Amino acid sequence: MAKKQVYFFAKGKAEGNAEMKNLLGGKGANLAEMAKLGVPVPPGFTITTEVCTHYYEHKRSYPAGLKEKVREDLKDVEKLMGKKFGDPENALLVSVRSGARRSMPGMMETVLNIGVTEKTIPCLIKLSGGSRFVYDAYRRLIMMYSDVVMEKAAGIEPEEDQGIRKQLEKIMDRMKKAKGCKDDTDLTANDLKTLCSQFKARIKEVLKKDFPDDHNEQLWGSIGAVFASWNGKRAVSYRRIEGIPDEWGTAVSVQAMVFGNMGNDSATGVAFTRNPGNGENAFYGEYLVNAQGEDVVAGIRTPAPINEYSKSEHNKDLTSLEVGMPKLYKELFAIQERLERHYHDMLDIEFTIEKGQMFILQCRVGKRNGPAAVRMAMDMLKERLIKKEDAVMRVTPAQLDELLHPIIDPAAEKTQKVLAKGLPAGPGGATGQIVFTSPEAVQWKGQGKKVILVREETNPEDVEGMRAAQAILTARGGMTSHAALVARGWGKCCIVGCGALHVDADKKEVHIGGQTLKEGDWITLNGTKGNVYAGQLPMVDATQENILLNSFLKVCDSVRKLGIRTNADTPDDAKKARQFGAEGIGLFRTEHMFYGKGADEPLFILRKMIVSKTDEERKKALDELFPYVKKDIKGTLEAMDGLPVVVRLLDPPLHEFVPRDPARLEQLAKDLNITMDELSKRADNLHESNPMMGHRGVRLGVTYPDISRMQIRAIFEAAAELIKDGKKPYPEIMIPVVCDVKELTNQLALGREVYQEVLAKYNLKKIRHMFGTMIEIPRASLVADKIAEVAEFFSFGTNDMTQMGFGFSRDDIGAFLPDYLQKGILPRDPFQSIDQEGIGELLKIGIQRGRKTRKDLEVGICGEHGGEPDSIEFCHRVGMDYVSCSPFRVPIARLAAAQAAVNN
Ligand code: PEP
Ligand code: MG
């Protein structure tokens, strides 16, 4: 433990500074910094977090010398304040506050007004000029101290609503009722004095101890209680959620009390150096005359605006600080300007005016919403207050997300009970009427209604309904389930794996959180958190800030090293992604052309091809399919003209496309000129017990080379035609589900043949292209050196790599993931954020071995992780060339890549 245990601060001098948050906590470090700058902070000292650690390591005792050092520093405070702690003639009061390295708002304890005792009360009355003020301070001390020190820190756990503080509040309410008072402020000095006696009697009765009437006992009781509150229930749960280590400990700041409730020349308030709601560069805040800090937050009185700018509907008739106390306002204004210039960020400042004298009690970097964060970053960059590397760190990916999707009005959401929770598969908010089938979703939308498609799980036939719906809610499935993937691709709100949901599609009702909802009932989803609410909640749209957003993202682009591509399967999505800043396509999933709008005909032909029995039948169907595939690929290559487009050959097991609907089956049988019996026999033959590991990807191409040939021809012909039109297509042909180099060699041989044929047909010398592979099977990573002898690029399919690396089915993880998370077996959903420890190692091995063989091997990622910030940082660190994600995630990826570059 460092020798120094206590750090002194007072206006003009301080032993600590803002850099010492680890030792002094955020509050203590900023108090020291402000004091150094000459800001008028009430003098005080901070006991370090190391003392807290010692306290816990030594059976809750203090290190030697602490008490003496505290006494010394307290003497210096007394000198500066011209008062003495515990002096019956001229008493000083102090506060004791907690402060961890990272802000843990409201999680630990504070005790104010320490030093009010029967002995000091008379002089306090004389000094403050009123006994009402003193008895009010006393009753606040008794309430806080009995709760924080005598009950919580003593480890007493009263029954719900039976805590000492609650009991005292009840006594106070009874008194108010008896006296016919509405507000606390209506109680007289005598009332308060009586209350203090009643409080003390109740404390003795309940806690079997006297309320301490000694100032030193009060001080050390409070210090101990703040240290103890580090391990209070609230603080411990908060640390678990926020990932704050238990060893950090809290610091304790002891500071001279100043009072905003000493009459009409006193006040207290909270201000922000810029507007945290919209980011405008204007001083913003509110205050209360004759009040203590807790009154501002408690919402008993309506605070007044500090200036004209801060006026709102609720407070426009109240006198602003600027008008009511112009000199003090000017002083405060100058201080906030100075602090912001010093800290290079928007600050949240707490101030108190005691009898016409300004004090700053606290400053910290202010919380802000998404639009405000972007605006402040750009403004401060322009003002040269920060550098571009700072600017990109000022907006979190979640804040950026707020700008890209409508969200539930946060004020309305706060008042709602969560009906059920699922996996947050598609961000943003949505509200709509429940429908249970895809055709109904389409039909209701046609009637101008907003619907939410609620399903047990989705399959490819639901795509139309998913498109028509505002949002999708499913009981089963994981983050990379079909519904999640498709919804994210469209920027749609989506919750999957909501286990509490029991869908009865026949009865058209859903049982959820003890409630039964029927078709047409309204529900609201928060797809960012995975929360489901009953009823219709208002939405807010933060997407207007686009010009600013674009310039912010350009700044990100100038900082990042990773390329950003998109997963897109249609020309429309490709165009959209390009507008969002995508620099190419990292994954074009050919099979997506068989889902959704305009898919009927190609899907029908594909089905014919799938159930073909002879090569002839298959070849005929493939010839029919060819123009559709070529057209789709051509449109996308054109939309991405000049940029690389990774086109993946057909990936999923074929039986996924066999229709289930009897009408469609009949039509298929008719067209093939076979009986229904024969058709179902053929369909049955395609059945696999484990399709994810079955006849899919490159395995299809090995068995049926014509399927690969048709696709490769479509790619080269589409490119050739574009070249003839003066365009610059750049296809990268990708073979999926590869586990051995020989699979690739096999496919490449036929690919090269087709290439030569197309060159000849179009009389071209060259079509710029690459042949490469997906690395999505663990074995492929291990033999990547061999694979790279043939593959010119790798793209990591981390969805399947996670599935096969963990042995977790990506479609069924919803059944057990919540237990794994709750029991701490997994820290996060590995389908959402790369499991760096395990799957990450597989990726590293793949990259190292691949590049050992081929130095200039292009490496990217196209699994869903490519749009998740922590995974993007990982991709940056392991030296990938690009990440690829759905179009709506592209801006987030640009930001996350820039932050990764700054952090590393
Ligand atoms: C993957 O496996 O990561 C991938 C991108 O492919 P798909 O999700 O289509 O299986
Ligand atoms: Mg895959």
Image (cartoon, rainbow, N blue to C red):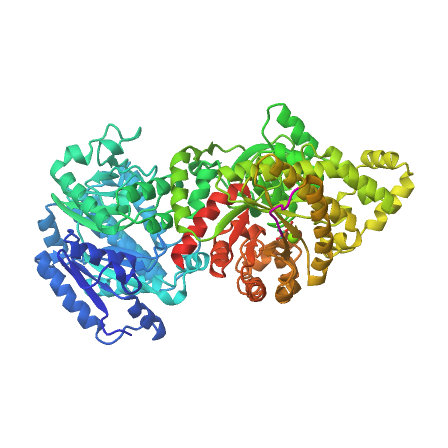
Count up the numbered dots. Answer: 0
Q: Where residue 557 appears, x then y in whole percent?
A: 42, 47
Q: Where residue 22 appears, x then y in whole percent?
A: 31, 63
Residue under the point 74% across and 47% down? 709
Whether residue 523 sits left or right of residue 20 in the image: it is right
Image: 307 above or below 514: above
Of the 4 image quadrants, the one containing the N terminus is bottom left
Whether residue 347 sits left or right of residue 584 in the image: it is left
* Whether residue 504 can be seen here: no
Residue under the point 55% across and 66% down? 848
- Which residue is most to the top? 447
Whether residue 234 sits left or right of residue 291 in the image: it is right
Residue under the point 12% across and 50% down? 125
Give the dominant element type of the magenta stretch: helix, strand or loop: loop
- Using the image as rendered, state which of residue 801 and residue 830 is in the foreground: 801
Within the image, what quadrant is residue 822 found in? bottom right
- Using the image as rendered, state which of residue 218 and residue 264 is in the foreground: 264
Image: 519 above or below 804: above
Within the image, what quadrant is residue 374 found in? top left
Q: Where residue 105 appears, x then y in whole percent?
A: 35, 52
Whether 814 is among the magenta residues is: no
Whether residue 192 sits left or right of residue 485 in the image: it is left
Q: Where residue 176 appears, x then y in whole percent?
A: 28, 40
* Whether residue 671 can be seen here: yes
Of the 4 image quadrants, the one containing the C terminus is bottom left
Which contiguous range is marked in magenta? 764-770
